[in-house]
Image (spheres, rainbow, N blue to C red):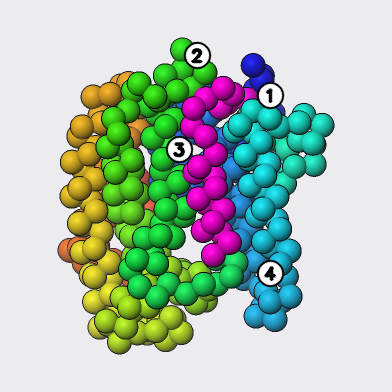
Amino acid sequence: MAKLIQSDLDHCLDVTRRGKSNLWFVGRSLPGPRRAMFASAYASMRVVDDFVDDEFLVLPDDERLRRRSDAHKRVDGWLTSMEAAICGNADPAKMEIAFPDPRIQRAVAACFDGGDIGPGPWQLLARSMHRDIDETPFGDWDDFIDYCEGATVAPASIFLYVIAADLNGPPSTADRLPAQAADCVRDMAIFCYLVHIARDIIKDAAAGPALLTIPDDVLHTHGLTRTDLAGAVRGGSDRRLRDLISDLAARAGDYRLRGEGWRDRLMPLLGLRERAAFGALMTVYGALHDRLKDDPGFALDRDPEQREELRRSVLAAADIPF
């Protein structure tokens, strides 16, 4: 069995804390072995997403066109290294040159050695990253949901695997999770993603149309396009923008209702600390969702401290350090 190197784990923990996401905060509260699994898997996904969003999509138009093929190759290289780590056939010598970072590949290989998770979540994320690189438009809601399978359902499925797996031998959820767990992950992940989109609409619109994942048909319903959404955000008081946030919150509510039903069935299958982490994650997003429903203008507040204070209070109530 591959041995986890502490410096590799420390590097993964550094990568996961960069964005200080809600998932990172609750992941810190997991017991040791599960925290290591979560950190390595989340870091492996964080690096490829950061490459696409923060390195490639922010380039000027002509530069993105010139470097698009290379960007696809980098994502392919990332996926190859992660498939090798998950499937247990990573060559230690090749790990030294693996993209994006051999430390992450080694940590994933050690934490998931012999497990039954399979490479599916990483393959789905790669598919969504390729779509981002191609800047394929989201024409309708079905396009958006298809994209979500990699962008948010895949990381969520890993999180559920980590908190539910039997670790008495090689990691396994084969006899611990019902078949409906996949439906739970999908509904809850899409709920959280929609809340995230509504909450960060100012930041994403300012970054440019390439980073907006709101489907065109939803924008058109409110008389908006990707291009003029940025103008509406700068104005801040545009009624169309508030209506759009209300729309996203309402759509999120449908997924929340179903997801919370699945959550209640899954909770008894988890350990005490794992249950607390899972519950805290959903409580944070639930509190954000409630606030957005009550006041769509909450997402347009230029002072991020309000949002941070809400998250801080929810995590504190769940006894999770901020």
Neighbor class of circle 3 (other Cα within 10 Å; few <14, some 14-19, many 20+) is many
Indicate the amino acid at tag 1.
Ile
Q: Is residue 158 above or below residue 292?
A: above
Work out whether mark 1 precedes mark 2 in sequence or the reverse, and give the earlier one. 1
Q: Nearer the viewer, mark 1 or mark 4?
A: 4
Cα gap from disc 1 to disc 4, whole angstroms? 35 Å
Instruction: Kindly identify which numbered label has been placed on residue 226.
Output: none
Q: Which residue is mark 4?
A: 68
Question: The magenta stretch spans which residues?
Answer: 110-131
The answer to if 118 sits in the magenta stretch is yes
Cα gap from disc 3 to disc 1, whole angstroms? 21 Å
- Horizontal and vertical percent for residue 54? 61, 62
Viewer can see residue 236: no
Cα gap from disc 4 to disc 2, whole angstroms? 43 Å
**280 displayed left or right of 7:** left
Cα gap from disc 1 to disc 2, whole angstroms? 19 Å
Instruction: Kindly identify which numbered label has been placed on residue 5.
Output: 1
- Tell me whether circle 2 and circle 3 mark residues in contact (CB < 8 Å): no
- Tell me whether circle 1 and circle 4 mark residues in contact (CB < 8 Å): no
- Tell me whether circle 1 and circle 2 mark residues in contact (CB < 8 Å): no
Work out whether mark 4 precedes mark 3 in sequence or the reverse, and give the earlier one. 4
Work out whether mark 1 precedes mark 4 in sequence or the reverse, and give the earlier one. 1
Dot 2: element: loop
Indicate the amino acid at tag 4.
Arg
For the point 52% across and 18% down, the residue is 170
Q: Nearer the viewer, mark 1 or mark 2?
A: 2
Neighbor class of circle 2 (other Cα within 10 Å; few <14, some 14-19, many 20+) is few
Q: Which residue is mark 3?
A: 158
